[in-house]
Amino acid sequence: MPGGRRAGRQATPFPSPAGNIVEGDPVGTAGEVRGGQTDDADAAEELFRGVYPKLAGWVRRLVDDDDTAHEIASEAFVRLLARWTKVESPQSYLYMIATNLIRDHWRKTERERRAIRSITAGSALDPVAYPTQDVDVRDLIASLPPRLRDPFLLHYYGGFGVREVATLLHRPEGTIKADLFAARAKLKTALGERDG
């Protein structure tokens, strides 16, 4: 098999996801998959080909590291496959898993930063290297409650519209709009306190 291609298959560079992302479930629920439309492996492969590039890109914007982004996106798919027959909307489940893995990554990173700060606390801080107006946006976003943080990340970092976020989080559009407004207000207040 030259070039790693399977015989009889056309290689396409990242096809668009099947189905309507706003209406949910691009490849069918596990029940539909078992119903004979397609087998589990083909449905999982179709979902992977359609969603992985967008998921990995979204995670990349949040963690700012290619390797970590691919690791998180791959882990999200592994966890999805472990629960494949129990998941109603695989794409929604993937993004929720990825959101949780990103939070875990941020927590780990913050613990590492605190450890490094405690080790280097004895050394004098250079005021030029650590300006007071330098704001760690990730810490501010991480400080939001999950009810506000999840729609904020999906909308502003993931590039999803309000309707898509509402579908992914299983909440009404009006609630998502209110949560986005509240998240922006909290971040604006936090930024004002740091500047003030």
Image (cartoon, grey):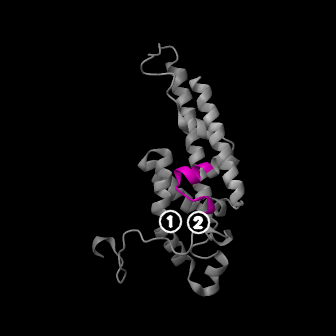
Q: Which residues are magenta?
A: 152-163
Q: Position of residue 60 (x, y in %)?
A: 46, 50
Amino acid at the residue labelled 2: Gln
User: Looking at the figure, which quarter contains the N terminus?
Assistant: bottom left
In percent of the image, x 57 and y 75: which residue is there?
Answer: 27
- Image mark count: 2
In percent of the image, x 68 and y 60: which residue is there?
Answer: 173
The majority secondary structure of the magenta stretch comes to helix
Which residue is under mark 2?
91
In the displayed orientation, state which residue is furthest to the left. 2
Please, what secondary structure does the residue beneath circle 2 have? helix
In percent of the image, x 49 and y 45: which residue is there?
Answer: 63
Please, what secondary structure does the residue beneath circle 1 have? helix
Within 10 Å of disc 1 (Cα), the crowding (few <14, some 14-19, many 20+) is many
Q: Position of residue 141 (x, y in %)?
A: 60, 40
Q: Nearer the viewer, residue 169 or 79?
A: 169
Query: Gap in Å between the C-alphas at discs 2 and 1?
Result: 8 Å
Image: 82 above or below 56? below
Which residue is under mark 1?
51
Asked if the residues shown at circle 2 and circle 1 are in contact, with their CB atoms under 8 angstroms apart, the answer is yes
Q: Position of residue 185 (x, y in %)?
A: 65, 39
Amino acid at the residue labelled 1: Val
Q: Nearer the viewer, residue 42 or 124?
A: 124
Q: Position of residue 169 (x, y in %)?
A: 67, 59
Q: Quadrant of residue 161?
A: bottom right
Q: Nearer the viewer, residue 8 or 28?
A: 28
- Residue 153 among magenta residues: yes
Is residue 93 visible to us here? no
In percent of the image, x 64 and y 48: which residue is there?
Answer: 180
User: Looking at the figure, which quarter contains the C terminus?
Assistant: top right
Is residue 4 visible to us here? yes
